[in-house]
Image (spheres, rainbow, N blue to C red):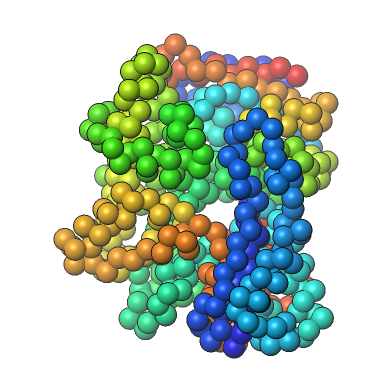
Amino acid sequence: MWTGTRTTSPGETREAGALFVATLPPGTVAALHGELGSGKTTFVKGMAAGLGLEDQVSSPTFALIHEYGAPALLYHIDCYRERSLVRWQSLGLSEYFDGQARTVVEWAEIIATLLPDNAVHVYFTHGEREDERQIEVRV
Amino acid sequence: MIVLGLESSCDDTAAAIVIDGRLCSNEVITQMEHSRYGGVVPELASRLHEQKILPAVRRSLELANVSLDQLSGLAVTVGPGLAGALMVGLNFAKGLAQARGIPLVCINHMEGHLWSNFLERPLQDDDCPFICLLVSGGHTQLWRVDRMGSYRLLGSSLDDAAGEAFDKGARLLELGYPGGPAIDKAAQSGDPTFVEFPRPLAGSAGCDFSFSGLKTALYYQLRRMDPATIASRRQDLAASYQQAVVDCLMDRLRKAVELTGMTRVCVAGGVAANSLLRERLDTWAAADHLVVSYPPQQFCTDNAAMIAMAGHFRLMQGERSPLSAEIKPNLRMDQLATN
C-alpha cells in the first residue's frame, strides 16, 4: 500500500493520486479528509488518470456524486454540502460501495459511520509554505 | 399542447405546466429549506423526492387549472444528476405515460437551463446562433448554440464551478449559506480593490475556467490576517473575491465571443442571479453592441418550467422517448437524452 507523500504543486498531488489508486483494489472505498483547498479534488484527478479514465474530473460538491467511465469505474462522492446521513442512505450510498468500482469520498468524516470497515483513509494538510501539501494514508 | 415537466436531478423536486409554449404553473419543493450547516439536521432534510413529487405535480396541475386527462405530453429530466434522484422523476413519468397513454420525452437538464432564457419571451428565429454561459453550483461551461439541439462545448471549469467558489468562499468568510447570495449581499458595501485575488486562466488561449486556486488564495489570505481585521474587513474581502470570480467569467465570455464572432449571449444557471455579473453583462452589452440575456431571478436555479419548455419544443418536433428510457447521471449537454 502507498503510504503518502509531501507535494509542492498540483501536478505532484495528481501524480500522488495516480500512485495511490494503483494500490487500491477494485471495490474499495478511499475516504479523503482535509480542509478546503488542501488538494483532495486534485488528488482524485490523479486517481482517475491512474485508472486510465479520460472523463473530466471536477468537484462534485454540488452534484454530490460524479460517475467516471461507462460503466462507472470510479465514483467520486463529496459530502461537504450534505450532512444528513439519512439523505446519504436514501441516495443509495451502500450500492455505490458494494460494487466492483472504486469509490473516493471527499469530506468522508461526515459519513464516517456509513463507510465500510476496510475503507482506506487519506489525510490532507496544508504545509508551512503555500504550495505545500502533506498527504498521509492510514488504513 | 399541454406539457407537464418534471425535474428531480439534485436537491429540488419540481413540476410545471406549459400550454402551447406558455408557462402556466411552476412548482418547486426544495430538499432542504434550512441552512445546510446547522448542527441538528431537521426532519425536513430526510424527506425524499418521492414524497414530494406527487404534491408538486398536483399543485402544478391545480395552478394551471388542468386535469391529468388533458395532458398531451410529459417531459422529464434524465440527466445529468444523481442516479437515485433522477430515477424518482423518470419512474413517475413512465408510470403516468403508461397509465394514461401520454407521449413521453426525456430532457437533458443542461439543455433545460438554456430554455430558462425563453420562458417569459418565446424563442425567435433570429435568437440563434448564440453563446451560452451555463454557470451554477455544479457547472461552469461555455457552449456555442447553433440552434436548439445543436451544441458545441467551447470550454468548462477544470475544477470547481463558479457557484461552488462563491459557496466555499462564503464558508471561509463565515458569511453563511447559501454562499452566492451571502457574498453578493456582503459585497454591496465592500471595496473590491481591497485584495487583488488571482484571476486563474484569465487571458489564456481557450475558454476554460479554474476556480480552485482562487478559493485557496482566499484561504491563505485569511490565514495571514488576524481575526479582528477579518471581522472589520469582511465586506471588503467578499467584494474583492466576488470581483475576481466575475472577472474570470467575463474574461472567458469575451474570449468566446471573440473566437466565434457571435453577437448574442445567453447566461443561465444559479450564478446568473449574481447582481455584479448582471451589471457587468449589461455594461458589456451596451458597450460592445451585443444582445445579452439572462433569466428572471426565479428561473436561474433548478426548476421544472425550463424542462416543460424544452419538452414542448422537442414534442412539437415529433420527438418521443420509449418507456424503456433510462437515467443518464453523467449526461453532457451535447449528448442526446433519448437513445
- Residue B324 coordinates in the image, percent (x, y): 77, 73
- Residue B35 coordinates in the image, percent (x, y): 58, 40
Nearest the eye: B328 or A16:
B328
Q: Quadrant of residue B95?
A: bottom right
- Visible residue check, residue A25: no
Q: Quadrant of residue B109?
A: bottom right
The residue at 34%/66% (across/down) is: B293
Is the residue A130 above or below the residue B84 in the image?
above
Q: How many marks?
A: 0
- Residue A17 coordinates in the image, percent (x, y): 60, 29
The residue at 59%/88% (across/down) is: B1
Is the residue A81 above or below the residue B337 in the image?
above
Is the residue A12 above or below the residue B127 in the image?
above
Nearest the eye: A64 or B153:
A64
- Residue B58 coordinates in the image, percent (x, y): 70, 72
The residue at 27%/28% (across/down) is: B195
Task: Name the residue at the left extreme.
Answer: B287
- Visible residue check, residue B93: yes
The residue at 48%/63% (across/down) is: B299
Q: Is residue B329 left or right of residue B291?
A: right
Q: Is residue A16 left or right of residue B127?
A: right
Is the residue B117 above or below the residue B121 in the image?
above
Q: Where's the C terminus of chain B, which quadrant?
A: bottom right
Q: Is residue A117 left or right of residue B108?
A: right
Q: Is residue B191 left or right of residue B84?
A: left
Q: Quadrant of residue B194?
A: top left
